[in-house]
């Protein structure tokens, strides 16, 4: 039997309404912050992700779904959202738009070949936000405010915002030297990934999940001690403004994020709920000051974040927050006989044009079975349509919850339901 690919999932009708509710809620928050949707292709040139994400990252080295197209070009299924947005920003010359910064959101599937865990899939849906075209601590604060508004709009309370500054490129250069001096004498005690990162990208050692409890992690140099005056001033302004608008945060000196294009503000949102599990990250992001130029664009900067809808669902479950199914069936037509079934089909078409949600039996079952079907489907009202009702043009509209019946004409059935 052909089965679903490992690391993917079917979102069935019994659950899809939750996704629709979450996406509608997130889009509503985006509109309040004046962010508009962007949609990019599901696959891009492999070179886009190699250059933007970084050839030392796990995403590029281990997790990308890459293939050759019929023109022998290397293509990759989109593993993350920022690089495609920046590519589109450059290609469509959005930097020339008088409305700056460019503020966009996306809601798209991503693909990474990684080990499946609870809330982590090889195909997953990422909702992300990007603000490109301005470098200002206040836009960083807006992004962080938006992130918190996303989760708080669902009633989530067990949240902890972690922030850090990874400085500009000059600050990072000095910091990376300090990390190499700190870790190199004992690097053979670390995993093979960390051993390869000691020269190529030592900051990524701090992000290692395998060696996170190694004693040297706790004593590693803090990047905030290596920030130059400009970077430190930027970070202090972000923190000051967060304090003014009442957003609580935890300073996390080991928070470096996994992608090479981040500079200055970096952040992650964690769930502190007891029932959430060992991997607590809900969302993450940061500022990227060199990415646009890296992809042959103008000297523009940006900031953004992305969240996994799968993990947002887990957070709601952990805090016992239920999403109610908004779907209602206004009317179920119980039919007796072939003529009544034919007429019911026409009646349903008319009622649907009247903006009612209606259904009928399509399996020619008995009356009792049809009523049970109406009950399973949660119908608010039912009518019985048979030879007598067709002759008189009158039906009894039954409220399924109370059993109350009201007689009405078939002609006025829609108004009676409303």
Image (tube, helix red, strand yellow):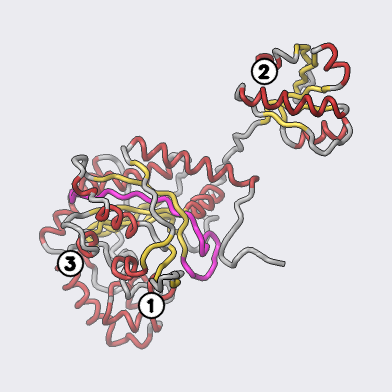
Residue 309 x, y percent position in the rendering? 48, 51
Residue at 32% over, 44% down: 145
- First in sequence: mark 1 or mark 2? 1
Residue at 39% over, 38% down: 29
Residue 347 x, y percent position in the rendering? 72, 23
Other residues around mark 3 within 10 Å, as few (<14) / some (14–19) / many (≥20): some
Q: Nearer the viewer, residue 370 or 393?
A: 393
Circle 1 or circle 2, nearest the eye? 2
From what the image shows, is residue 213 above or below residue 402? below
What residue did someone put label 2 on?
414
Label ID, residue 214: 1
Other residues around mark 1 within 10 Å, as few (<14) / some (14–19) / many (≥20): few
Label ID, residue 264: none
Image quadrant where residue 340 sits: top right
Tell me whether the residue at label 1 lies in contact with that at label 2, contact meaning CB atoms closer than 8 angstroms: no
Tell me the SS state at disc 1.
loop
From what the image shows, is residue 301 above or below residue 346? below
Tell me whether the residue at label 1 lies in contact with that at label 3, contact meaning CB atoms closer than 8 angstroms: no
Whether residue 254 is visible to the viewer of this picture, yes or no, is no
Tell me the SS state at disc 2.
helix
Which secondary structure is most common in the magenta stretch? loop
Structural distance between the alpha carbons of marks 1 and 3: 27 Å
What residue did someone put label 3 on?
169
Tell me whether the residue at label 2 lies in contact with that at label 3, contact meaning CB atoms closer than 8 angstroms: no
Q: Which segment did they paint magenta?
A: 112-136
Q: Is residue 346 left or right of residue 295?
A: right
Circle 2 or circle 3, nearest the eye? 2
Residue at 20% over, 77% down: 178
- First in sequence: mark 1 or mark 3? 3
């Amino acid at each position: 039997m052909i089965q679903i690919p490992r690391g993917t999932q079917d979102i069935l009708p019994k659950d899809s309404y939750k996704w629709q509710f979450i996406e509608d809620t997130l889009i509503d928050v985006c509109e309040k912050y004046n962010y508009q949707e962007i949609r990019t292709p599901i696959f891009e040139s492999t070179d886009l992700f190699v250059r933007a994400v970084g050839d030392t990252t796990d995403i590029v080295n281990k997790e990308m779904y890459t293939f050759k197209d019929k023109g022998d070009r290397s293509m990759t299924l989109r593993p993350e959202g920022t690089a495609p947005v920046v590519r589109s920003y450059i290609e469509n010359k959005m930097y020339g738009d008088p409305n700056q910064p460019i503020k966009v959101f996306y809601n798209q599937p991503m693909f990474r070949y990684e080990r499946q865990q609870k809330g982590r899939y090889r195909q997953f849906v990422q909702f992300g936000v990007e603000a490109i075209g301005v470098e200002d601590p206040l836009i960083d604060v807006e992004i962080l405010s938006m992130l918190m508004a996303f989760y708080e709009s669902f009633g989530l309370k067990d949240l902890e915002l972690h922030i850090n500054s990874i400085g500009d490129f000059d600050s990072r250069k000095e910091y990376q030297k300090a990390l190499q001096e700190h870790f190199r004498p004992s690097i053979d005690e670390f995993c093979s990934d960390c051993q390869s990162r000691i020269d190529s990208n030592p900051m990524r050692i701090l992000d290692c999940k395998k060696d996170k409890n190694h004693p040297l992690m706790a004593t590693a140099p803090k990047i905030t001690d290596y920030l130059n005056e400009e970077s430190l001033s930027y970070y202090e302004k972000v923190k000051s403004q967060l304090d003014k608008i009442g957003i609580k945060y935890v300073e996390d000196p080991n928070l470096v994020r996994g992608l090479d294009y981040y500079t200055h503000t970096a952040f992650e949102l964690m769930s502190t709920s007891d029932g959430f599990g060992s991997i607590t990250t809900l969302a993450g992001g940061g500022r990227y000051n060199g990415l646009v130029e890296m992809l042959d664009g103008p000297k523009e900067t940006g900031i953004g974040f992305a969240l996994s809808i799968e993990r947002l669902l887990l957070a709601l479950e952990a805090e016992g927050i239920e999403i109610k199914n908004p779907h209602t069936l206004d009317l179920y037509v119980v039919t007796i006989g072939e003529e009544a079934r034919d007429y019911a089909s026409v009646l349903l078409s008319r009622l649907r044009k009247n903006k009612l949600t209606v259904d009928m039996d399509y399996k020619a079952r008995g009356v009792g079975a049809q009523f049970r079907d109406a009950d399973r489907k949660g119908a608010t009202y039912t009518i019985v349509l048979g030879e007598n009702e067709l002759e008189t043009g009158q039906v009894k509209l039954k409220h399924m919850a109370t059993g109350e019946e009201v007689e009405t004409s078939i002609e006025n059935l829609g108004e009676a339901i409303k």
